[in-house]
Structure formats: structure tokens, C-alpha cells
Amino acid sequence: MKITRRLNRKAFAAAVVKQLKKYEISAVLVGGACVSIYTNERHASHDLDFISPQAHEKIEQALAEIGFKRKNNSYKHIDSDFYVEFPSGPVAIGNEVPVKPDGGFTYRGTQVQMLSPTQSVMDRLSAWYHWSDHGSLINAILICESQPVNLDKVRRWSKLEGEEKKYEQFLIDLKTNKKK
């Protein structure tokens, strides 16, 4: 699949994953890109974060073959506004390590692994719980408004994180936001 500016986020992610698979590189889509996909771009960012156990040198070789250039920890293609980053792994949500991703999609025959909506809510709440990142709280709410989310699982995980009070505030904000 050729990288062009007309590719949407899912198509772009699938093109990256397809190329990585040619080099037997596994990768899981995490972070804000999951929020963007699950909220139909209500949260828009240009980066796609993938967690991969492979060395950056091997990833760089695979992506260079289809026109990506590495700059620091980002991989940019001249024909796209999206760029790719590979934060260190393994896949984790708060103190839960490792995490098996429960989400994904298939685009033109390419399976893309990603966090599920519930896991994405937990991932965003983790940033709010630990760093008071209010934008991440908003993103968690946006996902809940757009996708089915297992709030019992989120509550249990929040308790393990020691964040029952912030979880209760999240529920209040979620209900308040739904009334708007």
C-alpha cells in the first residue's frame, strides 16, 4: 500500500503494520491514535504510537524501504501528515505490565493489533491518575461516549492503581458530559 496524504489513520496504520510484518516485526498500536480511531477523530493527533519488541535499527530498515525517514524517535513519510513513534515497551497500562491488547481492526487484509476501547480508557485514565493530565481524562470520556466500555473492569483496575477517588470523579465527569 502506497503512503499518500489521502490515507486515513486506519489505512496509514495498516500500511505501517503490513511493512513491519514483511520483516517479521510485531507492533501494537497504543496511545492517542487509539483514541482518535475510537472517537472517529474527535481527538486528532498526527502521531501513531506502536509498541514493538524489535530494535529500532530493524524497524528503521523496514520503514525506510517504503520511504520513511527517522528523526530522533519519530519516523516521517514525506507524503503524509502522520508520523510514527515506537515508545519503549512492553505494552502497559499504569502498573499493569505486560498487557495483552484486546482490540484491533483489519484493513485490506492487514490485521492491526491495538488496545481495546476499555483498555484505551484505562490508558488515558492512567495519565490522568499519575500525572493529572486533564486532556487524558477528556479523551477517556470521549471514548466512553463513542464505544462500549466495560466500566466494571475500569473500576477494578482503578482500585488496583489506588485511584478509587479519581475513578469516582471520572464517573461524575462522564455523567455530566453526557447531559450536555
Image (tube, rainbow, N blue to C red):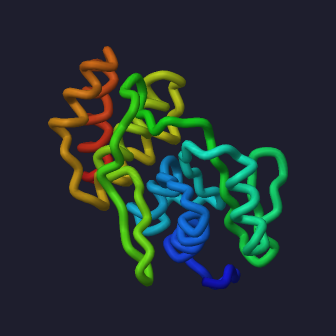
- Does residue 17 appear to the left or right of 152 in the view shown? right
Q: Measuring from the top left, give residue 73's x and y in whole percent.
A: 75, 46
- State the image coordinates of residue 128 (x, y, percent, origin top left): 46, 30
Q: Which residue does the image show at 36% across and 62% down from the upper left?
A: 104
Instruction: Spot the residue most to the left.
Output: 152
Q: Quadrant of the N terminus?
A: bottom right
Front in this rendered view, residue 90 or 95? 90
Q: Quadrant of residue 163?
A: top left
Horizontal and vertical percent position of residue 118: 28, 46
**Along the line of sight, the residue nearer the viewer: 63 or 172:** 63
**In terms of depth relative to the viewer, which is nearer, 151 or 14?**
14
Residue 123 in the image: above or below residue 108: above
94 relative to 3 in the view: left or right:
left
Give residue 5's position: percent from left, percent from top.
Answer: 69, 81
Q: Is residue 48 above or below residue 126?
A: below
Quadrant of the rendered image containing residue 77 = bottom right
User: What residue sits 52% from the left and 71% below the top?
Assistant: 14
Q: How many marks?
A: 0
- Residue placed at 60% from the left, 70% from the top? 19
Left/right of residue 129 with respect to residue 119 in the rendered view: right
Image position of 160 with respect to 101: above or below: above
- Residue at 62 percent of width and 41 percent of height: 87
Quadrant assignment for the C terminus: bottom left
Quick one: 132 or 176, which is closer to the camera? 132
